[in-house]
Structures are given as C-alpha cells and as structure tokens.
Image (tube, rainbow, N blue to C red):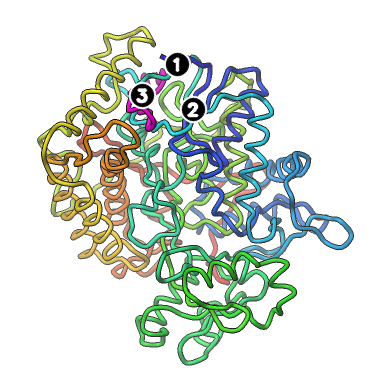
Amino acid sequence: MHEHDVIVVGAGGAGLRAAIAAREEGADVAIVTKLHPVRSHTGAAEGGINAALQEGDSWQDHAYDTMKGSDFLGDAPAIETLTKDAREDVIQLEHWGMPFSREEDGTVSQRPFGGLSYPRTTYAGAETGHHLLHTMYEQVVKRGIEVYEEWYVTDLAVTDEDDPEDRTCHGVAAYDIKTGAVEGFRARDGVILATGGLGQVFDHTTNAVANTGDGQAMAYRAGVPLEDMEFVQFHPTSLPSTGVLISEAVRGEGGILYNSEGERFMFERGYANNEGELASRDVVSRAELTEINEGRGVEDEYVHLDMRHLGEERIMDRLENILHLAADFEGVDGLEEPMPVKPGQHYQMGGIETDENGETCIDGLYAAGECACVSVHGANRLGGNALPELFVFGKRAGYHAAGRDMKTAEIPTGHSARSEAGDVSPAVEPGAVDTPIDGADEDAVADGGSLADPTAVVEHEVKTQRERIEALLEDDGTNHADIRAAVQETMTANVNVFRTEEGLETALEDLQDARRDYQDVAVEDPSRTFNTDLIHTLETRNIIDLAETIALGALARTEFRGAHWRAEHQTRKDDEWLKHTMIAWNDGDLDLYYVPVILDGESKSYEPVDRSY
C-alpha cells in the first residue's frame, strides 16, 4: 500500500495546482492519474484566463459579470473568491514562466470574451491551456512531487456510517494500467478529486475520450451529493466532424458568424443586438441551432465562422492553432474561407458539491476544477472563467487538505443544508436496478462501519475492486461499447441544447435500460496490461450514473435559466427556482432536494435582473 499525507486524483490544471499548494504547506503529496500530466484535457483549453489586471477593471466588475453570466444561480462567496484570487494567481503563473502573449510595451495582453464588460481575458496565443499545463507541471517536477501516472482510480475508500456527513475518506483504490495490479493509496490527511469533465456522456463533445466523469461518479456513490447537474454547456463553435473546439478567442478577436443566407444572424435576427457574437455561450449556441432548425444552416448542419477579415498577420500571431485545426479536421483554410461550426458539449457547470475551500460533506474528501461545483458558474459559465477556477480552487483545496488554517467557508455542504425536497416523478424510477454490478454497488464504503482503522478501510476497498475486475475479465457478457453508445445517443438526442419533457422522460427510460444491460457487462480482452477495454468498461458505469443525474435534474427544473432550456417552460422563474438542484445516490435510491442560492456577497447583494446581451 502506498501512503502519503495528501492524494490528488487527476493531473490537469486543478490537480497540479492542488499538489503544488499541498507541498508548499509541507505535506507529503502524490498525484495519481490515468494519464501523463501533460496529456490532461486542460491542454486543450485555447481561449484564456479572466482576471482583473488593469487599472480600469476590478474584481467587483468581474464578479458581477460572472454572476450575470450564471443567470443568478452562482453563489456569491464562490464567485467573489474566484475573482479576488485570480489576479494574484495569474501573476504567480507569470512569475513561474507562463508565456503570456504581450503588448508592444511588454504588458500582458488581454482581449474581449463573451459576457464580459471589460477585456480581461489573458492568453498565450491560442494554446493557453497547453502552456498553463506545462508551466505547472514544471513546478511539480521542481518540487519532487511523486506522480503515479497511468494509474486509474476505480473508487474511494470511505467509511459507511448511515449519515454521509459522518463518513471519512481514507484513500483510494487504483488499477495500474501498466501491470494490471490493483493497489491501495492511503491518504493521511485528505484526498482531492481533480478528474475533470464528463463530456463522454454525449456523442458530440469537445472533451477528450478520457473525460468520463470518474471523480463525480465516485464521490456520488460514496455519499456526496451532485449539484446542478442539469446545467451543461454546449460551446457554440465546435467542428462538425469531430467536436474539436474552435476557441471563443476567434470571436474575441472579431470573428463573425454567418448563416447560409450570408446574414450576420446574431444581429440581423435579433439574438444579441448589443454583443452579437460575444454574447454568452448559451445564447450563441441556441441562436445557431435555431438558424439550423429553421432551414438557414449550411448543409442543414452548421453555420460559418469567418475570420478572414482579421488579416493573415493578426491570425498567425494570435490564432495560428485555429488554422491548423480547421485544416486538419475539416480541410478548410481559415485564411481563405469561413470555417464550419456547430454547438458541442463542452463543460459541466454542475458537479461534486463543495465549499470555497474544496471540502465536501465527507471528512477528508475534497474536489476542485470542473468535477466540482462550488458554485461559481451557476446556470452558465463565461468563457475564460474555467482556467482560473482550476488554479484558484485547486490551490485552496491543496492548502486546506494539507492543514493550512483557512477562513471558515460560507457555503454549506451535505444534506443538512437542504431547504426542501424535490417532487419530480418520472415515468421510470431512476437509480440502481435490482442486481448489483459486480461489486460496484458497494459504493466505495467499508463494511457496516466496523472498520475504524484507516488502513483496513483502504484494504477492504482494494479487495472489493480486485474482485470486481476479476469478474469483468473472466465472465462472458455484453460489450460496454454498445451500452455507452446507447447512452450517448439518447443524451445527445434528448438532453441537448433544446429539451422537452417527453425527451427527458425518454432519456431516463433509456438510461434504465442501459443500467440493466450493464448488469451483464463483460470485458472481451483478457489481458492484464494496458487493457483499454477494461478501463472503458469501468468508465461506462460512471457515464451511466452521471447521465441519469443530468436528465433527472433537467426534468425537475421547470424553468428556462442559462444553459437549461425547456420547451414547456420558457421563462426564468426567480420566485420558484433561485435554488440549487441536489441529487444524492443514497445507496441507489436517489434523493433529490434543493439548497438556496447565496446572492449576498462581501461587497453587495446581487439582485437578479433580466440577462440580455
């Protein structure tokens, strides 16, 4: 068994920053990751980092823009923490060698981004995430932090008291992809989940194949509620053939969207009369799909994004990577012709419920980055706010897990914060089906609360995971790929940008079918090393669990807010829905309830207003 003070699961931006902070606090810290750190999906982030760096800007303005962008479903303490800390943390990155783009006088460049009242998005060409990842990985190497790369964490080692708020996380069980061994990692002080997004729940996504929501699913089954899962961001500019992202930076630099009739539809069709292409992402995505659905799409599938007017010099200086993506994946020369784009799943606003310090309701378990929900983004994330979320809250989680004395969090966690129970009644009952899934439904907890020794808790989980993997390798059954494809197809068809009650009910029925099919799942490849079939089979369980929370939350929320659009409910209902949707696994008997949004901040109370751009 491996033992460290702090175990960080995942090595993207949040995980690397959490590990650095924990080491700065004197902890023996290790990173356990199924990918090499510089292959993490943070490296695909192109656009930039929002921070109030200039004299004419302020963290208060950044906070208001973020709250407005969230459609007033963000929590003020989280938003103000992000916007106050981002400036200092961006400067720290610059001191570590982050190669930010600069103006002629040497100052860091900042450009406009969607939903911002000031050009506060710093960037490094069109490869900001790539440079951020390498900059922080250098700091991990410099500090001698141990990295267990190509270890896939399959579950958490958590005690199983009846009340999740009485439980403690003592470590994780992980599968060594290189050898096939399953071993335990005991965390003396804390486990930090930084596993990124869940894009593989959908079949058209900007996310990497590895983004299967592992951290969210593990925390969920261990007893941590998932928050606001219905809010999924669909980025307006992904390439139609692959889902590869075309950065918002193109529109930030002045790129224009056209329909098949040559109309600049954001203005000419009245979707965003003031901000046009730089309206928030949910507004632009709905506009594009409306154009396509009403017959004004190009080849009835996409719209055009044109940057030719920017000129070759400016494009090569600031957007060169975009030219390569368009040429490689669509055969289009962005200097000579417009690029085809359409909305694609991009980011999950909801996630593991945490407070400002990254703590969950389970003692010793933290989460940061896209897998977590603080909530900074509420119903819609602004472009440029994801990367600062990684390092601001990754740092805070690392410090807290390592024992730093932090300001008491203002955001409550766990079921004790509930204000009311949910009353949605789908046609099929969501949650676990009758037959356990080869040990997976033991939900990462120890046996009857009798295992008080932390090492014994971890050893018990390792034993459970070994038995689960052996069963998958030795039994005959259904291939996971068929089940995963069915999940992705129903989510893309029924839980996309435009949602209907009938479609959401259909999705929940399809997901229950997927659960039943998964009872008979098996791995065709019997090998013990580099067995991607096994990894994908384990990931598919996570995809099913998370897809169900997204669809259930979307059915429950009977309003139109941010990225959540309901055909039957075309207004934002502040009198009913200024509250977070919480879903707890509860041993497979799902518990849906609500927690009030916190709109009172340090400097002001954020009164909801109509959100227009």
Circles 3, 1 touching at the beta carbon (< 8 Å): no
> Earlier along the polypeptide chain: callout 1 or callout 2?
1
Numbered label attached to residue 173: 3
Q: Which residue is mark 1?
A: 2
Residue depicted at x 47% and y 40%: 372
Residue depicted at x 77% and y 59%: 109
In the image shown, does 93 or 350 lie closer to the viewer? 93
- Badge 2 marks a residue whose secondary structure is strand
Name the amino acid type tagged 1: His
Q: Is residue 140 above or below residue 452?
A: below
* Quadrant holding the N terminus: top left
Circles 1, 2 touching at the beta carbon (< 8 Å): yes
> Earlier along the polypeptide chain: callout 3 or callout 2?
2
Name the amino acid type tagged 2: Tyr
Q: Which residue is mark 2?
A: 148
Name the amino acid type tagged 3: Ala
Residue 228 in magenta stretch: no
Q: Is residue 568 above or below residue 474?
A: below
Distance between mark 3 and mark 1 Cα atoms: 10 Å
